[in-house]
Amino acid sequence: MTNATAFEPIELLRVLCRHGVAFVAIGGFAAEVQGVSWSTLDLDIVIEDREENYTALAAALVDVDAWCLVPLGSIQRIRPDLELLRALTGTLMLRTRCGRLDVMKGSDSGAGGDNYATLARDALETNLGGSTFLVAGLSAILRMKRAANRPKDRKVLSMIEAAIEAKNGSSRQ
C-alpha cells in the first residue's frame, strides 16, 4: 500500500462542490489562488458546523475514497463517517484519491480562532475548474499563520504581507 497520491486540488474541489459541502479554503492553497507564490501539497478547509453539511461532507469523502492518517506502519485505514465529523475537534487529516485534505470546524483548530462564519464574511468567491467556492482572504490567512507560529508558517509571513501590500497598492490607484 502506498501513501503517495498526486495532489489534484481541482478534482477535490469539484467533488466537495458537487456534494454541496459548505466550506472556506484556507492555508497555502487559498494563498496560492490569490497570487502568493506558494507551492502546497494539500487542501485545508474549514467547514460549516451544521448537520446537513456533515452529511454532504461524508458523501463527498466516500466519493474521493478518503481515509484518516494513521500511525506509520499501520495497515488499517480508518474511514471518516458521520459520527467522526460530528465529533470533530482540531484537524481531521485525510488522504484521498486526489491527495491530502485537512478538514477543520474552526475555532479549536488550525484556523487561528476563526470558524466558517467568521471566515466566510471576508472570503472571496472563486471559480476554478468550473467549481465555485469560498477562499479565505489574505488577511485571514496571515492571521492564521501568525497564530500557528510554526517555523513553516513564519517563513511565508513576508510573502503574504507583500501580496496584501501589492493588492492594497493596486486598489489605491
Image: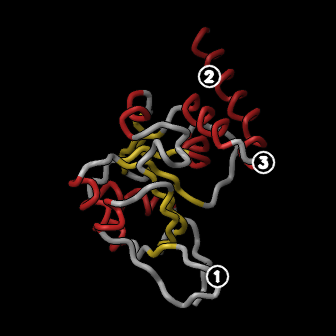
Dot 2 or dot 3: first in sequence order is 3
x%, y% of residue 5?
58, 75
Q: Residue furthest left?
A: 52
Instruction: Look at 46% across and 57% down and name the residue there.
Output: 103
**How many angstroms separate mark 2 from mark 3 (CA)?**
25 Å
Q: Residue 133 sits in which quadrant?
A: top left
The local secondary structure at tag 1 comes to loop
Name the disc covering residue 72, or none. 1
x%, y% of residue 114?
47, 37
Name the disc covering residue 167, or none. 2
**Residue flagged by tag 3: what amino acid is it?**
Pro
Q: In front here: 65 or 6?
A: 65
**How many angstroms separate mark 2 from mark 1 (CA)?**
42 Å
The local secondary structure at tag 3 comes to helix
Say if 67 sits above or below 127 in the image. Answer: below
Say if 161 sits above or below 62 in the image. Answer: above
Dot 1 or dot 3: first in sequence order is 1
The local secondary structure at tag 2 comes to helix
Q: Quadrant of the C terminus?
A: top right
Instruction: Look at 76% across and 32% down and name the residue there.
Output: 158
Q: Which residue has dot 3 on it?
A: 151
